[in-house]
């Protein structure tokens, strides 16, 4: 089976790496390592807890894989710093049990006001602090680069370049592939539209945060649902801090330079939220980071067929900034699903009546 993966970010690189290890699969990975792509801009937070149970199952598996593999931890530059997730919802028992089973001793629950022990003050009543001792962060761009290197070492082909036409003039898929997977992040919806294909609800969304100078007791990685604020330490005397955005349909390649005024407004909002939740931390100058990513209606990174009338064409994107947590496990599931689909097509072809 010949597979062409379009997109050399975290999702595409990991999928190509998974596929090149499967017997009988020949892999071509095509894409440019764009410095304004989401993989380069991601904060890289990895933990087991997620409100969405599907994403949580992937995140738990991915974190367990990191701890089981010193090689992957090195590739990803993984750092364990712990995390606190403040939620007003009742955490799903199935997710909590999965974290306990995969990473014994990592998880604890506490009332939201107990989060003050972790540097988070003024949490509204009724919140729960999901605390994970073994959470941390990775460098997604570094992990993607190491995965691409492994693709080459295992006999796959990695080629820089931009794909605009998915079909060749003769009607074959690009690179004469049996299957094509579009894992080009924010470029995916436009690539589909440019080839007259449905986007399946995929849209671009802006990710934006700041890396602030920070004085005072910097907390571990955290997410606060009540304000939307999230953050983590970023070296000595610095904090990465951000808020969710509603900036839809941002052009691929968007960076903070494309919206300096909006970036300043967003930084002011972050400062106001931080003053409420991190009163002992004083924020100074900041460096803005922004990139467009691809978002699916369900917010999940998974393999999706583009349309029944175009068998052999898939997308692998849609997590919008959450792929750092889910990509290690999602890439395994996507490789399995792709090979199952190919076997089914081969069976259907064998059973087709001879004209």
Image: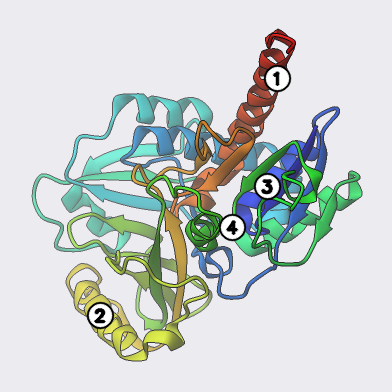
Q: What residue is at 10 percent from the left and 55 percent from the top?
A: 124
Question: Nearer the observer, disc 4 or disc 2?
Answer: 4
- Disc number placed over residue 290 in the picture, else none: none
Question: Nearer the observer, disc 2 or disc 1?
Answer: 1
Residue most extreme to the front: 355
- Disc number placed over residue 14 in the picture, else none: 3
Of marks 4 and 1, which one's residue comes earlier in the chain?
Answer: 4
Residue 278: percent from the left, percent from the top?
25, 71
CA separation, marks 2 and 3? 35 Å
Question: Nearer the observer, disc 1 or disc 3?
Answer: 1
Q: Secondary structure at mark 2?
A: helix
Q: Which residue is mark 2?
A: 271
Q: Counting other residues with Cα less than 10 Å from the Cα at mark 3, is it few (<14), some (14-19), or many (20 or more)?
A: many
Q: Secondary structure at mark 1?
A: helix
CA separation, marks 1 and 3? 22 Å
- By what rule are the colours in the image chosen? rainbow
Residue 206: percent from the left, percent from the top?
39, 68
Q: Secondary structure at mark 3?
A: helix
Image position of 35 (left or right of 238)? right
Q: Nearer the viewer, residue 108 or 91?
A: 91
């Amino acid at each position: 089976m010949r597979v062409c993966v379009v997109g050399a970010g975290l999702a595409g690189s990991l999928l190509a790496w998974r596929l090149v290890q499967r017997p009988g699969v020949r892999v071509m990975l095509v894409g440019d390592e764009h410095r304004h792509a989401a993989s380069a801009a991601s904060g890289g937070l990895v933990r087991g807890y997620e409100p969405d149970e599907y994403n949580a199952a992937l995140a738990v598996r991915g974190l367990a894989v990191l701890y089981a593999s010193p090689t992957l931890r090195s590739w990803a530059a993984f750092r364990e710093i712990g995390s606190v997730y403040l939620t007003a919802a009742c955490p799903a028992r199935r997710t909590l049990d999965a974290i306990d089973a995969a990473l014994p001793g990592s998880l604890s629950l506490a009332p939201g006001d107990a989060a003050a022990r972790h540097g988070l003050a003024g949490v509204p009543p009724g919140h729960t602090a999901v605390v994970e001792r073994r959470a941390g962060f990775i460098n997604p761009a570094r992990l993607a680069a190491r995965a691409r290197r492994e693709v080459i070492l295992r006999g796959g082909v990695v080629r820089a370049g931009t794909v605009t036409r998915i079909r060749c003039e003769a009607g074959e898929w690009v690179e004469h592939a049996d299957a094509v997977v579009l894992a080009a992040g924010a470029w995916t919806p436009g690539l589909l539209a440019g080839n007259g294909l449905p986007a399946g609800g995929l849209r671009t969304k802006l990710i934006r945060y700041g890396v602030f100078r920070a004085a005072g007791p910097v907390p571990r990685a955290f997410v606060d649902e009540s304000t939307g604020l999230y953050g983590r330490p970023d070296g000595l005397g610095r904090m990465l801090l951000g808020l969710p955005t509603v900036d839809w349909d941002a052009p691929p390649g968007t960076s903070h330079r494309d919206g300096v005024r909006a970036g300043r407004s967003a930084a002011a909002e972050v400062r106001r939220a931080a003053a409420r939740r991190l009163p002992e931390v004083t924020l100074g100058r900041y460096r803005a980071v922004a990139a467009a990513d691809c978002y699916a209606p369900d917010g999940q990174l998974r393999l999706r067929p583009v349309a029944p009338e175009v068998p052999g064409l898939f997308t692998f994107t849609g997590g919008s900034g959450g792929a750092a947590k889910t990509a290690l496990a999602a890439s395994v599931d996507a490789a399995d699903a792709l090979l199952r689909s190919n076997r089914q097509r081969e069976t259907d072809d064998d059973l087709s009546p001879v004209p």
